[in-house]
């Protein structure tokens, strides 16, 4: 299956900027199915972790108010071109995905 | 042949000053169209009209620039790219139908096919490619079709729109004129024409929405709309082709929408894109 | 919270008071257990959400925290928000939408290498202030920006 994460990590003046777009419904649990009238169950990413060369840089705790197909960007110091940045997400249904890129 | 051309040119020359005079052709219409918008929005560089409302409203532009930091269509564009190169059962791919795509081809669409005597849009060409290779055509207006069209558009970024209405071809001119009439004709319960909103009232608001200028409209199609993304699921939900938007606009003025790739919408797209000749392709575009 | 602090300073470590202090994050290290802050996300007021996520609802409005978001959002379902905290040692940030039924949209824990910067896209139910906080050196700094959300019109 294709990755749900598209990510870029670029270094400039000693600061690495990480930007990532994720494919995810981020369903709040409040929307009603138009046909059945029942609420569509909540399904959203709860945690996003950013790592640099295996060391955790950022942990994001998300709720359902983060938009569908969510975006995140964060910055950190000390990364060099070629080093690895990994982004991992997990959601309230136990699903997860992860992606690693080299800093450009 | 030569004498006919001279007579035609003379006839055109006689009425060059009147924007919508009976003898005015596509070239004169284009000149008048551009002049109108550049006068309405002084200070907006011509090329910037490719960015629609973001060219004329600073606040909206700021939000758009935030979205452009990582456009939401990127995952969908990857799907479009994969579909573009994916091999059919017979070993060919969509890419084989569009051998110059990587050099940029979107700027030439829609084009007049003199043998078939009809206008061919990029979406029509994509699905005809699939059928010609024994594959089921995509559904119109969105999904994979829009994603492939978006990818082809993306490869064409920066190329100048170059829709051709061949001179001395009355059939081609008839399609152009049909599209032009559609654009200026009032329709629906609200009795609006495309021009009412996007020419006369461009830059003004209709309820809470800012009306985009028609100049530059199709340079950034297919679009990726936040509204469509919110309604659908998956990375392709936000994509829409020109005919998807035409249908939506017609419904919004409470007019019956036409089918995708209908003669009406292809004519409209032919005229509508011609009016953006010379402007740069900037597809796909993130929009509201 | 104030009572618990006084008790602690007096040296009378009543179990109840310590429990409150720990619960409010005043004594315990910020991350005893890495867990999704459920009570913070369920809180129905900004004050309660703040207490649950950064341990206090007392914040210092600061020009060093900048919230970049549109004046008028194109679509309330996708509102881009970028928060920049030009403060040394930011270890936590959070973004709230004051008038959302549950104001907390997200919280962020930052390692010492991370800058006080986060950008994302949020859902807003209606016109509201977007409130961003950044915690550094035990203090919580905040900023807010109003974002208008309209019902749209013909195109929206």
Image (cartoon, rainbow, N blue to C red):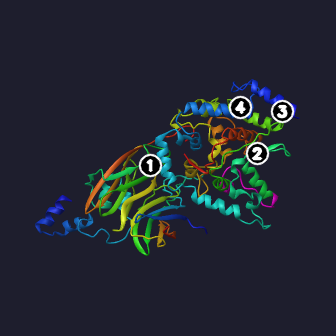
Q: Which comes before the other along the chain, label 3 or label 4?
A: 3
Please tell me whether residue A2 is drawn above or below residue C120 in the rendered image: below
CA–CA distance in space, label 3 to label 4: 17 Å
Residue B145 inside the magenta-drawn segment? yes
Residue C46 inside the magenta-drawn segment? no
CA–CA distance in space, label 1 to label 2: 43 Å
Q: Position of residue A22 (x, y in %)?
A: 52, 62
Is any part of residue C38 visible from this angle?
no
Residue lying at the far bottom of the rendered structure: A54
Q: Position of residue A59 (x, y in %)?
A: 40, 66
Residue topped by disc 3:
B5
Q: Nearer the viewer, mark 2 or mark 4?
A: 4
Residue topped by disc 2:
B111
Q: Position of residue B254 (x, y in %)?
A: 64, 35
Residue topped by disc 4:
B28
Residue topped by disc 1:
C124
CA–CA distance in space, label 1 to label 3: 61 Å
Label 2 environment density (alpha carbons within 10 Å; few <14, some 14–19, many ≥20)? many
Mark 1 touches mark 2? (CB < 8 Å) = no
Specify start and end residues of the magenta stretch as a single range: B132-148
Please tell me whether residue C115 is drawn above or below residue C132 in the rendered image: below
Q: Nearer the viewer, mark 3 or mark 4?
A: 3
Q: Chain of mark 2?
A: B
Q: Which comes before the other along the chain, label 2 or label 4?
A: 4
């Amino acid at each position: 299956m294709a990755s749900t994460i598209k990510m870029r990590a670029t270094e400039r003046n000693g600061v690495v900027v990480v930007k990532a777009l994720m494919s995810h419904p981020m369903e709040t649990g409040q929307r009603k199915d138009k046909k059945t009238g029942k609420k569509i169950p909540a399904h959203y990413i709860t945690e996003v972790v950013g790592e640099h060369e295996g060391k955790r840089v950022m942990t994001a705790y998300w709720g359902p108010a983060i938009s569908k197909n969510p975006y995140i960007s964060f910055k950190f110091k000390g990364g060099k071109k070629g080093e690895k940045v990994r982004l991992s997400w997990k959601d309230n249904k136990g699903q997860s995905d992860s992606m690693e890129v080299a800093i450009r | 042949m030569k004498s006919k051309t001279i007579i035609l040119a003379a006839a055109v020359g006689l009425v060059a000053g009147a924007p919508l005079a009976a003898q005015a052709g596509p070239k004169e219409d284009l000149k008048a169209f551009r002049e109108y918008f550049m006068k309405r929005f002084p200070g907006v560089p011509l090329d910037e009209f490719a960015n629609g409302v973001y060219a004329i409203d600073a606040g909206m532009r700021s939000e758009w620039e935030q979205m452009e930091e990582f456009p939401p269509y990127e995952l969908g564009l990857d799907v479009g790219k994969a579909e573009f190169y994916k091999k059919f059962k017979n070993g060919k791919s969509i890419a084989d139908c569009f051998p110059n795509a990587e050099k940029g081809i979107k700027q030439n669409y829609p084009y007049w096919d003199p043998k078939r005597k009809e206008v061919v849009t990029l979406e029509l060409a994509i699905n005809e490619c699939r059928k010609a290779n024994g594959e089921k055509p995509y559904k119109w207006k969105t999904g994979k079709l829009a994603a492939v069209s978006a990818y082809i558009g993306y490869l064409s970024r920066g190329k100048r729109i170059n829709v051709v209405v061949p001179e001395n071809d009355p059939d081609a001119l008839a399609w152009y004129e049909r599209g032009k009439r559609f654009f200026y004709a009032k329709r629906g319960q609200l009795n609006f024409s495309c021009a009412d909103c996007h020419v006369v009232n461009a830059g003004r608001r209709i309820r809470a929405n800012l009306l985009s200028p028609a100049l530059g409209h199709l340079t950034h199609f297919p679009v990726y709309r936040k509204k469509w993304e919110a309604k659908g699921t998956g990375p392709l939900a936000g994509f829409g082709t020109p005919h998807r938007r035409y249908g939506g606009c017609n419904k919004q003025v409470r007019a019956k929408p036409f089918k995708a790739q209908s003669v009406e919408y292809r004519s409209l797209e032919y005229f509508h894109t011609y009016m953006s000749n010379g402007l740069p392709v900037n597809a796909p575009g993130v929009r509201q | 919270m104030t009572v618990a602090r006084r008790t602690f300073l007096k040296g009378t470590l009543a179990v109840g008071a310590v429990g409150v202090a720990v619960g409010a994050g005043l004594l315990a290290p910020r991350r005893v257990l890495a867990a999704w802050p459920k009570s913070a996300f369920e809180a129905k007021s900004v004050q309660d959400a703040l207490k649950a996520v950064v341990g206090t609802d007392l914040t210092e409005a600061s020009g060093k925290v900048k919230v970049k978001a549109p004046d008028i959002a194109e679509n309330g379902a996708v509102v881009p928000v970028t928060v920049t905290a030009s403060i040394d040692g930011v270890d936590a940030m959070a973004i709230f939408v004051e008038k959302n039924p549950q104001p907390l949209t997200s919280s962020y824990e930052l390692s010492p290498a991370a800058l006080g910067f986060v950008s994302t896209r949020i859902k807003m139910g209606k016109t509201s202030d977007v409130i961003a906080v950044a915690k550094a050196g035990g203090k919580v700094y905040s900023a807010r920006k109003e974002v208008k959300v309209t019902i749209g019109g013909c195109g929206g």
